[in-house]
Amino acid sequence: MKTAFFAALLMAASLTPALSQPAAPRTLTMSGQGEVRAAPDTVTLSAGVTSEAPTAAAALAANTSRMQGVFAALKKLGVADKDMQTANFSVSPQMTGGNNNTPIRITGYQVSNQVQVRLDDVSKLGAALDALVNAGANQLNGVNFAIKDTAPLLTQARMGAVADARARAETYAKAAGVTLGPILSLSENENQGPRPVFMAMAARADKAVPVAAGEESVTAQVSIVWEIH
């Protein structure tokens, strides 16, 4: 009889901690996104010269002469040395033959020299493209618009993302007949960074190359967990 009594007592004691544990809170998880748009204030492009000649020396000399004109044009536009960087330089033979047992032979050489350029005034892009071509550049590509300081825009986007998540959560909570409690966790997803959203024709001089700067978009995404009652 005593044995059965003590066994029941031990069982009750072992169940007491489990029964006294508080129930896990009910939660609602919602994501939100914020987006801020702004006009770009800087642009980068790649400009260069590709030259061909029967000999490597002749191709290099021709290329050097034209590239000097390209650098002079950039200087005239007010581009600082720190905003110009050589991005590619190559010397390669031009070959023919090799098919139907035809011997391969060198017919000439090609020299390519490209420079990466950054303009802090987007409105100068059209004039810059025109000046570079007139100076001898026959390779122009990689035009990319950007915003130099995205920190203030990202702050606004983050605030918008939190507000968006809360508005969504309140809608779902109301529909489910519950109320939002305190926030249990908040995390930010990987920021997608500035990206072009649309292009608009920029004002330009009569002889300048037409360009479109458009806008850049800075976004932020968050995920928030609320306790609900």
Image: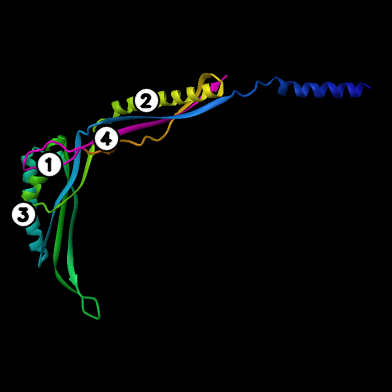
Residue at mark 3: 65
Which residue in the structure is indicated by mark 2?
Answer: 160
Q: Which mark is residue 90?
A: none
Residue tagged 1: 126
Q: Is residue 129 magenta?
A: no
Amino acid carrying label 1: it is Gly
Work out whether 110 lies above or below 119: below
Image coordinates for residue 5, horizontal then vertical, percent:
89, 21
For badge 4, the amino acid type reads: Glu
Question: Of tags 2 and 3, which is closer to the observer?
Answer: 2
Identity of the residue furthest to the bottom in this view: 101
Chain part drawn in magenta: 200-229
Residue, disc 4 = 216
Tell me: residue 85, above or below residue 6.
below
Q: Amino acid at mark 2?
A: Gly
Residue 185 locus on image (x, y percent): 49, 25
